[in-house]
């Protein structure tokens, strides 16, 4: 399987980083990474990672300015693309086919080739312009998957929440890293007295 991962300048770059870490554990997955300039800034602001170390997690890395990259063409076979996190600017570019950078161009190609595009918007609260863009992206075929934490799995740390979200994104591609505590129904749940 070949997946493109775009990490943009929205807060929550750790989600994209964790996704790349998980993809590295899957031997039959080839990851292609594009970091926006905003993502590089947020990596430094929000995490202990350096952009080069994040890039080292991927099999192939592209500059966001390289509109001639292989992933900018529909003839380059991929199984899908994940933009995690997806800034509202990137969402707007995808919806309006305004491909002035490689992340948006690769997303545009993913949609036109009818391959799976997963957008992980990390913005709150949303105004009506955001919700219109999300609606338009969904009608174009994108899967909208905000990083909404689950609590049925009784997370003990922020890492547990991040791992669950990244694992659920991989579920959308039929991939399982074993990081998700899956709901088994209320009979298995221990209730506090």
Image: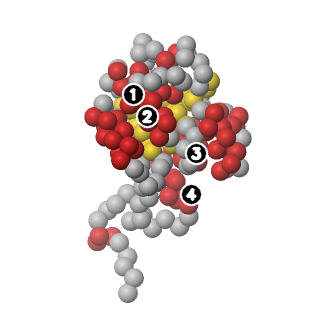
Q: Residues within 10 Å of mark 4 (few under 14, many from 20)?
A: few
Q: CA distance from mark 2 to mark 3?
A: 19 Å
Of the numbered discs 4 and 1, the one sitting upstream in the chain is: 1
Q: Which quadrant holds the C terminus?
A: bottom left
Of the numbered discs 3 and 1, the one sitting upstream in the chain is: 3
Of the numbered discs 2 and 4, the one sitting upstream in the chain is: 2
In this view, the mark in front (2 or 3): 2
In this view, the mark in front (2 or 4): 2
| Element class at badge 1 | loop
The residue that mark 2 highlights is 92
Could you tell me which residue is drawn at 27 percent across and 34 percent down?
Answer: 139
Q: CA distance from mark 3 to mark 4?
A: 13 Å
The residue that mark 3 highlights is 13
Q: Which mark is residue 159?
A: 4
Q: CA distance from mark 3 to mark 1?
A: 24 Å
| Element class at badge 3 | helix
Q: Are marks 3 and 1 in contact (CB under 8 Å)?
A: no
The residue nearer to you, when weighing 93 against 155, is: 93
Q: CA distance from mark 2 to mark 4?
A: 29 Å
Which residue appears farthest toward the bottom when viewing the image? 193
Residue 137 seen by the camera:
yes
């Amino acid at each position: 399987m070949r997946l493109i991962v775009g990490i943009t300048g929205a807060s929550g770059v750790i989600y994209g980083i964790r996704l790349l870490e998980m993809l590295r554990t899957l031997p039959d997955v080839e990851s292609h990474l594009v970091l926006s300039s905003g993502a590089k800034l947020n990596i430094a602001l929000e995490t202990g990672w350096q952009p080069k170390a994040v890039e080292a997690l991927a099999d192939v890395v592209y500059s966001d300015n390289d509109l001639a990259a292989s992933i900018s063409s529909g003839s380059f076979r991929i199984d899908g693309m994940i933009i995690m996190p997806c800034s509202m600017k990137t969402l707007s570019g995808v919806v309006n086919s305004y491909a002035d950078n490689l992340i948006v161009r690769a997303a545009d190609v993913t949609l036109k080739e009818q391959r799976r595009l997963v957008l992980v918007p990390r913005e709150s609260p949303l105004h009506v312009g955001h919700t219109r863009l999300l609606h338009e992206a969904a009608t174009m075929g994108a899967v909208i998957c905000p990083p909404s934490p689950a609590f049925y799995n009784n997370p003990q740390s922020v890492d547990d929440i991040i791992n669950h979200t990244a694992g659920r994104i991989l579920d959308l591609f039929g991939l399982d890293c074993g990081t998700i505590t899956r709901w088994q129904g209320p009979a298995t749940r221990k209730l506090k007295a």
